[in-house]
Image (cartoon, grey):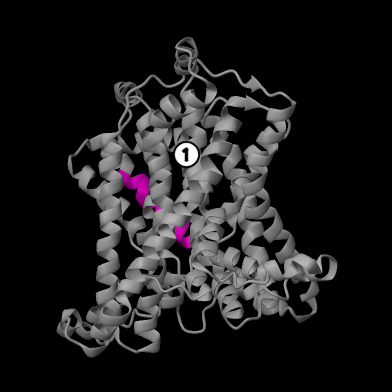
């Protein structure tokens, strides 16, 4: 085990001399493209829905969350098939518009296309926080801007965006972490990133040393992004009175309604509707080949690991927040930072770290073999998604004043009664949000599952990936469809729950 961190093996120097610059350049390029288009797809629709009244507004306010139900790798598999030479787009053009079909006959498996596709899947992270932030700002700032003669665009650019910058940065941070964690999409598109390099070194080159060293480099990149996000959010911190006056939605005229529908419709149609129709069509065309018993088994496995992880996360997160609330210990700040770092760790890094850890444990206790067990898989999920579940619970605890606890204690309530009669009921919606978010993320997770799953244990995500990587995308559609349907139902439930958090 001591040789793992020695940087003198031949494979690593080969990667350093030939591929490391390529990994770095591609990772940065993909992050940049995905971030840019995620902001475009999220911020403008969130602003329009938060401030304007137009036909279709309520519909878009629900469906713009739904692309989050489609994992990035499924989005990539689907669009690669749609855009391929034998796909519906090029086939339609060849049959109906042969004079322009050659212009669209291109190789779409490019990093720029992948960045846009991933943005279509990930933009709801930014949309959600932007939507909440824009709605909670109130009307005073907009009224002052109008009195100063600022146009609607100037108000948005000079007032609203700066006030919402911390929230937008937090959503953007989640997008960047998902891009750094992504494996299935970048592998399929043939884009060399740090994550694909870790898998290549481990599985193709059978070199744990090099995989570990690449994991350390990726970890350094992730920590850099993490601390930059923390620095920017601390630098651009604004104190303003939330909901000083609730904004009145501005009625949109005919042309503004059309523009609003276009701006909101593009991310919905390309991020959810078109992929869903294509996947549904493939599932219907291949239904005779579906092994229903295998489908049931994979669904059971997926729901099992997602359920166990979500329950574990909300129990631990609620316990930590409750202890912080009643003890007010300074140690909570350090625990909070550690938990936040968990989501910043890519799945490949967590997988590598746990294999090294439990390999060491197995060497000390020969009779115990934890690698390849369901326990280690759930443990890895909990590490990665603890921050996801903790965030809404922490926000809920912070919203409730100290007078609640003081009044309950004056009435003779002990610690257990505080937990049972006060904090559990008033935080039930936060617990529901935390459960749904964690469940969805675990259901979509691919790198951790591929690395740590028990022998002969597959989920809907791994089966979708294995069929797609073997160029059997139609066969993968039914598994993709189940992930999307379950995720969409939960996201609609989530939207109904968190709608109580803002006025519009």
**Residue 497 image position (x, y, % from top left):** 57, 38
Residue 138 image offset from top left, x and y in percent: 48, 20
Q: Is residue 83 above or below residue 330?
A: below
Residue 281 figure quarter: bottom right
From this viewpoint, is residue 374 visible? yes
Residue 89 position, x and y percent, is 74, 66
Q: Is residue 14 above or below residue 350?
A: below
User: Magenta: predominant secondary structure element?
Assistant: helix
Report crowding for label 1: few under 14, some 14 to 19, many 20 or more residues within 10 A (C-alpha). Answer: many
- Residue at image position (84%, 66%) is 96
Looking at the figure, which quarter contains the C terminus?
top right
Magenta stretch?
Answer: 308-320
Residue 217 located within the stretch drawn in magenta: no
Whether residue 319 is in magenta: the answer is yes
- Tell me which residue sits at (68%, 24%) in the image: 252
The part of the image, by quadrant, that contains residue 466 is bottom right
């Amino acid at each position: 085990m001591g040789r793992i961190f020695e940087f003198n093996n031949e494979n690593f120097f080969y990667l350093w001399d030939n591929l490391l610059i390529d990994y770095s350049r591609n990772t940065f390029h993909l992050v940049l493209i995905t971030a840019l288009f995620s902001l475009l797809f999220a911020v403008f629709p969130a602003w329009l829905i938060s401030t304007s009244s137009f036909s279709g507004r309520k519909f878009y306010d629900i469906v713009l969350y739904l692309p989050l139900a489609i994992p990035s790798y499924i989005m990539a598999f689907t669009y690669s098939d749609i855009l391929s030479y034998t796909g519906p787009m090029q086939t339609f053009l060849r049959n109906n518009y042969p004079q322009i079909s050659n212009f669209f006959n291109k190789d779409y498996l490019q990093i720029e296309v992948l960045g846009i596709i991933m943005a279509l899947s990930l933009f709801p992270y930014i949309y959600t926080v932007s939507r909440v932030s824009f709605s909670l700002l109130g009307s005073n700032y907009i009224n002052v801007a109008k009195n100063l003669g600022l146009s609607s665009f100037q108000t948005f650019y000079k007032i609203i965006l700066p006030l919402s910058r911390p929230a937008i940065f937090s959503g953007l941070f989640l997008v960047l972490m998902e891009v750094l964690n992504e494996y299935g999409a970048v592998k399929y598109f043939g884009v060399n990133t740090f994550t694909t390099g870790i898998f290549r070194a481990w599985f193709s080159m059978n070199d744990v040393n090099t995989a570990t060293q690449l994991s350390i480099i990726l970890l350094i990149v992730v920590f850099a992004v993490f601390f930059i996000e923390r620095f920017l959010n601390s630098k651009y911190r604004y104190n303003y009175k939330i909901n000083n006056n609730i904004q009145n939605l501005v009625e949109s005229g005919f042309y503004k309604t059309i523009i609003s529908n276009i701006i909101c419709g593009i991310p919905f149609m390309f991020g959810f509707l078109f992929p869903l129709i294509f996947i549904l069509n493939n599932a219907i065309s291949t239904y005779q080949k579906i092994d229903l018993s295998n489908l049931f088994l994979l669904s059971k496995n997926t729901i099992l690991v997602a359920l166990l992880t979500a329950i574990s996360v909300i129990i631990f997160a609620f316990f930590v927040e409750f202890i912080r609330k009643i003890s007010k210990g300074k140690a909570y700040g350090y625990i909070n930072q550690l938990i936040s770092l968990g989501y910043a760790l890519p799945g490949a890094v967590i997988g590598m770290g746990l294999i090294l850890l439990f390999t060491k444990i197995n060497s000390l206790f020969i009779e115990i073999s934890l690698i390849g067990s369901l326990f280690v898989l759930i443990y890895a999920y909990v590490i990665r998604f603890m921050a996801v579940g903790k965030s809404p619970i922490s926000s809920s605890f912070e919203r409730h004043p100290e007078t609640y606890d003081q009044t309950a204690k004056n009435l003779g309530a002990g610690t257990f009664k505080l937990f049972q009669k006060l904090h559990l009921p008033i935080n039930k919606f936060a617990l529901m949000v935390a459960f749904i978010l964690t469940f969805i993320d675990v259901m979509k997770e691919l790198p951790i599952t591929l690395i740590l799953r028990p022998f002969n244990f597959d989920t809907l995500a791994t089966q979708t990936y294995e069929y797609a990587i073997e160029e059997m995308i139609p066969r993968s559609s039914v598994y993709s469809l189940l992930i999307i349907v379950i995720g969409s139902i939960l996201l609609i439930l989530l939207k109904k729950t968190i709608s109580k958090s803002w006025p519009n």
